[in-house]
Image: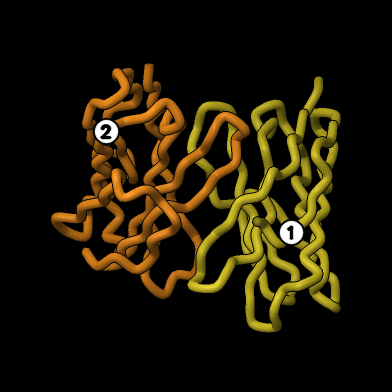
Amino acid sequence: DTAVSQTPKYLVTQMGNDKSIKCEQNLGHDTMYWYKQDSKKFLKIMFSYNNKELIINETVPNRFSPKSPDKAHLNLHINSLELGDSAVYFCASSQAGGGEKLFFGSGTQLSVL
Amino acid sequence: DAKTTQPPSMDCAEGRAANLPCNHSTISGNEYVYWYRQIHSQGPQYIIHGLKNNETNEMASLIITEDRKSSTLILPHATLRDTAVYYCIDPEYGNKLVFGAGTILRVKS
């Protein structure tokens, strides 16, 4: 069983569209994250949720809105997509109090045309 | 920006030990140093972490200098599947992991 799973793996869409990426973890972890990896391969944290509550919110356009229906899920909604949003988005999870041992999903490659 | 410094790339012969250095001169006394790697087209993978004692697990060993300003990740017998980008991380405030550019390790047969 995949510990942290993201869907879809690939997402190609037009500018201006609204899209969502889903993430689920079956590890029983309390904390989930979204990271963005741009074309230069730098990984940057976007959001972190602990038990459905937002705890880290980096300088991310408000077109990006995370939603956590329960602690096993953290979805990422992106409105009015722009060319610069093209990147690979990674979901991750960790156990509260478990330090920074994160388990990452395999990524969603978003291409905005 | 990341608080660590790593060489941009290294080569290693298959079967030999790969020693990846990292400088983290501003690390606080109670902060751990973490190592992750990212194999092409995959998500980052946790390898090991340590505070001040040397650590070993099934994947690697971590040697931390006494002043804690640098560390070395050791893959004792590198294989082709160890070719990846290796990240050394000194967490930011709020326990955020900030990934730098890392070291591209190429294991060659």
Residue denoted by label 1: B4
Q: Position of residue B40 (x, y in %)?
A: 58, 28
Residue B80 location, quadrant:
top right
**Marks 1/2: CA distance?**
35 Å
* Residue furthest bottom as drawn: B29
The N terminus of chain B is located in which quarter? bottom right
What is the three-letter code of the residue carrying label 2? Ser
Q: How many residues crowd mark 2 within 10 Å: few (<14), some (14–19), many (20+)?
A: few
Q: Residue at x 85, y 29 (%)?
A: B13
In this image, B19 relative to B75: left or right? right
Q: How is the image coloured?
A: by chain
Closer to the camera in the image, B92 or A9: B92
Q: Residue at x 39, y 64 (%)?
A: A56
Q: Is residue A77 visible?
A: yes
Disc 1 is placed on an element classified as loop
Chain letter, yellow in picture: B
Q: Position of residue A95 (x, y in %)?
A: 37, 65
Count of numbered badges drawn on the protein = 2
Disc 2 is placed on an element classified as loop
Callout 2: residue from which chain? A
Residue B37 location, quadrant:
top right
Q: Residue at x 47, y 53 (%)?
A: A45
User: Mark 1 or mark 2: which is in front?
Assistant: 2
Q: Is residue B65 above or below residue A47?
A: below
What is the three-letter code of the residue carrying label 1? Thr
Callout 1: residue from which chain? B
- The colour applied to the residues of chain A in this rendering is orange
In this image, A66 relative to A35: left or right? left
The C terminus of chain B is located in which quarter? top right
Residue denoted by label 2: A80
Disc 1 + disc 2, Cβ < 8 Å: no
Q: Is residue B39 above or below residue B70?
A: above
